[in-house]
Image (cartoon, rainbow, N blue to C red):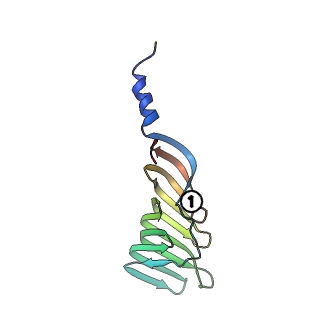
Amino acid sequence: MFDLRVVPVCIALAFGAVSATAQETQVAFGSAKADPTLPVEVTSETLNVNQEDGSAEFIGDVIVIQGEMRLTAERVLVIYNEGRSAIERMEATENVVLVSPPDAAEGDWAEYTIDSGVIVMKGNVLLTQGPSVISGDQMVANLTSGTATMSGRVKTILQPGGN
């Protein structure tokens, strides 16, 4: 005999939000491929430059813009290459938000390696793509290829039937 109490559960699973967990998930990230050769604009409340180690620390409402990519955080440390002629990488901490339209991600920490166009985000990473949300411990986003990999206890909530 068929149990009618199962029908509402089946309908909810078929038409409602679907949740899935995995260890690693690859997804598209951003609609336009980024160009890591574009200038990097940084705005903040405070700037501390360390001539000895070739770094610059931006503190307070930091906004980093490169092309269509936008990264915000409370603190961003800029590390220059050996010759101090170009930015090697940036480390962002506290309330880190990365936007590569139409997608957005947030996390506790991020490192952006300029030449490769790769951003690694760690700590409570939450990726929003339209109505769908993916969370995990780490996201590696390649802005030049428009892809990202979520890893570490990945949880996905998909909204079926939408655009």
101 lies left or right of 25: left
Q: Position of residue 72 (x, y in %)?
A: 42, 69
Q: In which quarter of the view is residue 142 placed? A: bottom right
In the rendered image, the vertical position of residue 100 relative to residue 134, given as above or below: below
Left or right: residue 145 compared with residue 127: right
**SS class, disc 1:** strand
Q: Is residue 72 above or below residue 51?
A: above
Residue at 41%, 74% (x, y): give it.
Answer: 62
* Depth order, front residue of 95/130: 130
Residue 149 rendering spot, x and y as whole percentages: 57, 55
Kindly identify the residue that appears in the image at 53 percent across and 56 percent down. 138
Q: Residue 74, position in %: x, y? A: 40, 70
Identity, as a three-letter code, of the amino acid under mark 1: Val
In the picture of the structure, the residue carrying the numbered disc 1 is 140
Q: Residue furthest top?
A: 1
Q: Residue furthest bottom?
A: 51
Q: Residue at x 46, y 45 (%)?
A: 157
Q: Number of marks in the image?
A: 1
Task: Residue 3 in the image: state x and y as whole percent.
Answer: 43, 17
Q: Residues within 10 Å of mark 1 (few under 14, many from 20)?
A: some
Determine whether 70 is above or below 45 in the image. above
Residue in the image at 46% along x and 39% along y: 18
Please indicate whether residue 120 sits to the left or right of residue 43 in the image.
Answer: right
Q: Nearer the viewer, residue 51 or 99?
A: 99
**17 or 110: which is nearer to us?**
17
